Image: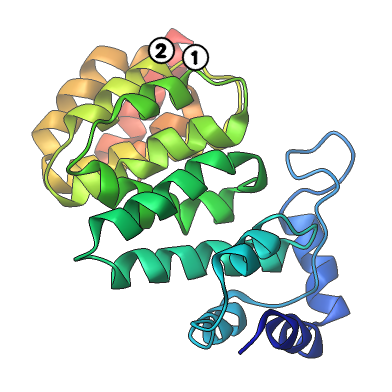
């Protein structure tokens, strides 16, 4: 499938009703985190189905999609990059080119779903065996989506049983002002707890009184109800 054919296929499946719902769901109104984002109106499985037909696209084609004003085209580009990264698992040079492309285009990875469907699967897997300093840089970024990339990327490390980077980055983001970062950090803490609940307990015991309530709520979502309520009360008492 050529680029023009893929774009045509996206538009043939577009639904104005789905687009309207997505514009609300992804907060595209004035002053919201997704301000100005535009949606064709496709669901993720529809986009994924087309990704499987994308092998004919050139690197420039993928970059064109990534720079698109349309959310689903950017999502498609990122899913294509992930697909190519996985297929190139025995070609380090090819994987490195995709990582460089990803890092050079974070301005276009500009909503939480775009981050969450690409950062762990591409950047995270790469950084399992490469220097991770970029994550500390991103965690200090003024750009919300780079901060989210930093934290969500560590999901790949958590899956490999490596929890230290997640804990360090979250520790540095305890006072981040954005709700989407509270959710991201809490989510990754919860995932870390699935690997080692004692590590999560120690982290919470040290930091929970300084954590945003949303972060704490996400982190303890799977705790027994009595323990969850106890920790939420402790957070409220100290806030």
- Measured in 3D between alpha carbons, the distance from the residue under mark 1 to the one under mark 2, in whole angstroms, is 8 Å
Residue 120 appears anywhere in the view = no
- Residue 179: % across, % down: 59, 32
Q: Which residue is drawn at 42% across and 64% down?
A: 82
Q: Which of marks 1 and 2 is nearer the N terminus?
A: 1
Residue 197: mark: none
In this rendering, the answer to whether 173 lies above or below 196 is above
Foreground label between 1 and 2: 1
Q: Quadrant of residue 210?
A: top left
**119 lies left or right of 67:** left
In the figure, is residue 72 to the left or right of 208? right
Q: In this view, does 194 lie above or below 136?
A: below
CA neighbours of label 1 inside 10 A, class few (<14), some (14 to 19), many (20+): few
32 w.r.t. 211: above or below: below
Circles 1 and 2 in contact, beta carbons < 8 Å: yes
Quadrant in which residue 223 is drawn: top left
Residue designated by label 1 = 175
For the N terminus, which image quadrant? bottom right
Q: Name the residue under label 2.
A: 210
């Amino acid at each position: 499938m050529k680029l023009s054919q893929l774009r045509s296929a996206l538009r043939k499946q577009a639904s104005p009703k789905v687009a309207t719902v997505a514009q609300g769901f992804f907060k595209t109104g004035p002053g919201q985190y997704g301000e100005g984002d535009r949606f064709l109106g496709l669901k993720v499985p529809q986009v994924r189905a087309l990704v499987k037909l994308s092998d004919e696209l050139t690197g420039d084609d993928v970059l064109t999609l990534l720079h698109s004003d349309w959310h689903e085209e950017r999502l498609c580009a990122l899913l294509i990059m992930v697909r190519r990264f996985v297929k190139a698992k025995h070609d380090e040079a090819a994987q490195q080119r995709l990582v460089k492309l990803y890092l050079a285009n974070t301005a276009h990875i500009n909503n939480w779903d775009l981050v969450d469907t690409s950062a762990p699967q591409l950047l995270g897997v790469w950084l399992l065996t490469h220097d991770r300093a970029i994550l500390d840089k991103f965690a200090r970024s003024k750009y919300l989506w780079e901060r989210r990339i930093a934290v969500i990327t560590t999901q790949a490390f958590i899956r490999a049983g490596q929890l230290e980077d997640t804990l360090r980055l979250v520790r540095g983001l305890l006072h981040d002002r954005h709700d989407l970062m509270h959710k991201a950090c809490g989510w990754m803490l919860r995932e870390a707890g699935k690997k080692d609940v004692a590590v999560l307990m120690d982290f919470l015991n040290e930091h929970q009184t300084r954590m945003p309530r949303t972060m704490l709520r996400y982190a303890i979502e799977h705790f027994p109800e009595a323990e969850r309520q106890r920790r939420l009360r402790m957070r409220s008492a100290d806030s």
